[in-house]
Amino acid sequence: MDHLPLPDRASFPLLATNPELVWLDNAATTQKPRVVLDAERRFYEESNANVHRGGHRLGHAATEAYEAARKTVARFINARPEEIVFTRGATEAINLVAYSWGGSQLKAGDEVLLSTLEHHANIVPWQLVAQRTGAVIKPIPLQEDGQIDMTAFCTLLGPRTRMVAVSQMSNALGVCPPLAQLIAAARSVNALVLVDGAQGVAHQSVDVSALGADFYVFSGHKVFGPTGIGVLWGRTEILDAMPPWQGGGEMIERVSFDGTTFAPAPRRFEAGTPAFAQTVGLAAALDWLAAQDRIAIAQHETALYQQLAEGIRYLDGVRIVGTAPEKGPIASLVFGRAHPYDVAQFLDERDIAVRVGSHCAGPLMQSLGLSQGTLRVSLALYNTQSDIDRLLAALQDTLELLQ
Amino acid sequence: MSTWPDLPESLSLPTLSTRLEAAHGWEAKNRLLVQLARELPPMPDELKTGEHRVAGCEAQVWLLTRWQGNHLQLWADSDSRIVKGLLALVCAAYAQRNKEEIATFDFGELLQTLGLQRFLSSSRASGLAAMVKVIRNA
């Protein structure tokens, strides 16, 4: 089969107008293809009206666009539209589950298992609900290569385990936990599973029906869509049993001062005016990505990662943290004689954008003993061999200077 | 107690200002900051404690202050060389000043004058603000 051509920088206005920029901070946010910017602009220019309200032409058009976006998201992850809740992002989606499901289901002594790879967004909401309910957070340790220690995980699983929350792809290391095994093991003790897809969604096709998890969350802006919009997917029977978490318009069936009845999911969880223009942008991003040759993209990203890993072998004192074979296109680097912050300053001079620090993964950095954090290189489909060449050359010069 | 080092003449504020002004462009300034870090006397590990740590910086920063009569003495270190280079400037700017001078000295303006304004961007300024606060409360 012939591959479609890979999307190039010309499709991304920010990259097209900054030809010298080497954008290697894709795990923080991705640049947007023109089709996404056009879709949001067109919505504002042609269909702008509040959704689910107003007896007028534009109100209906906006509602149609909003609900069509829900269908697009559902199609993208192979779910049903009524299982898709729009949120501000992955963080809000996890907060929603922790607050609503956790707050109503967890009891003192119940256990929530979190991998040591997790982003703070998949830790702190659980800590908050644990404080309220008396539930206990149990961290799942890692192997030396950054992969989840499955033996330790199976030992931690027990009759009190109610929830296992784990990342599809670590934002800090790129390591991808073995979700199928984790989910099967969690099932055996009747625990639910939440998968944080914030990093994985831009790189791997997602089929929530096949995955077998109970919740899947992601953010629009990390998958070429707008900021301020994200997705919670949950199984209908679980969402239907969850109480509302924020009150307001749209999430109710009937309000009176004697009492209020709530709308069914997903609207029950979408209080107030949603970010409807951003849902249109998100739908455009997902339709655009789904139309690409995703196998070719994954091969391209893997080839770039290998080029980077190979180049780094020839640089003195540089090490990739997290060497597990199951990895996305993220390389977290530490240096024998240089601080990641200093290296990034010199890269920035050459318009090479990377991220340094603990990447909102404090427990992970503590478990790895990395008090200085790492320098993270995170790739996306528009990166090129030339980007990696320029990074490697800049790293070599910088490390000589910082000897 | 460790012996407090004197700042070398190469790190006095007039000399330092001349050196930084002579470095044109980011790369030259970054290189110079790395060089300044080599000239700033290191702090012994036993002083690099949580008590002396300044929170809010992108790298680890330790800052000690003490009064010699009316005048402030500083001792600072970082695990980042660029940050340590900036600390040389902090030390040069505030050393041997009295309480009144310290309260009114505008470190941000000094950075602007010396072409180091990019360290004032909001993602980086919190660390500097924290350091200035420690010095003003000394």
Image (cartoon, helix red, strand yellow):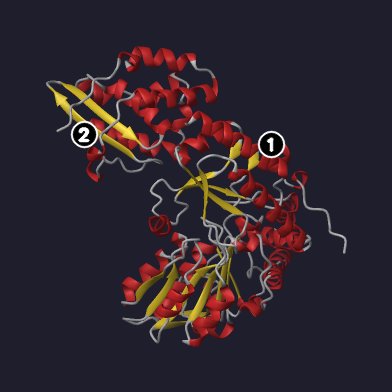
| Residue that appears at 37% across and 68% down | A127
Disc 2 on helix, strand or loop? loop
**Looking at the picture, which amino acid does disc 1 mark?**
Asn
Q: Which mark is residue A18?
A: 1
Q: Quadrant of residue A276?
A: bottom right
**Percent position of residue A139, x then y:** 40, 69
Instruction: Say which chain tag 1 marks.
Output: A
Contact flag, marks 2 and 1 (Cβ < 8 Å): no
Q: Which mark is residue B137?
A: 2
Q: Residues within 10 Å of mark 1 (few under 14, many from 20)?
A: few
**Percent position of residue A58, x then y:** 72, 63
**Looking at the picture, which amino acid does disc 2 mark?**
Asn
Disc 1 on helix, strand or loop? loop
Q: How many marks?
A: 2
Instruction: Say which chain tag 2 marks.
Output: B
Q: Quadrant of residue A297?
A: bottom right
Q: Considering only vertical position in the picture, is B22 above or below A15? A: above
**Percent position of residue A280, x then y:** 69, 61
Q: Which mark is residue A358?
A: none
- Residue A108 is left or right of residue A299, and the answer is left
Give me the C-alpha separation between circle 2 and circle 1: 44 Å
Q: Considering only vertical position in the picture, is A132 above or below A339? A: below
Does residue A44 show up? no
Q: Considering only vertical position in the picture, is A129 above or below A390? A: below
| Residue that appears at 58% across and 41% down | A353
Residue that lies at the very extreme toward the left in this rendered image: B69
Q: Nearer the viewer, residue A327 or A114?
A: A327
| Residue that appears at 25% across and 31% down | B135
**Percent position of residue B137, x then y:** 21, 34
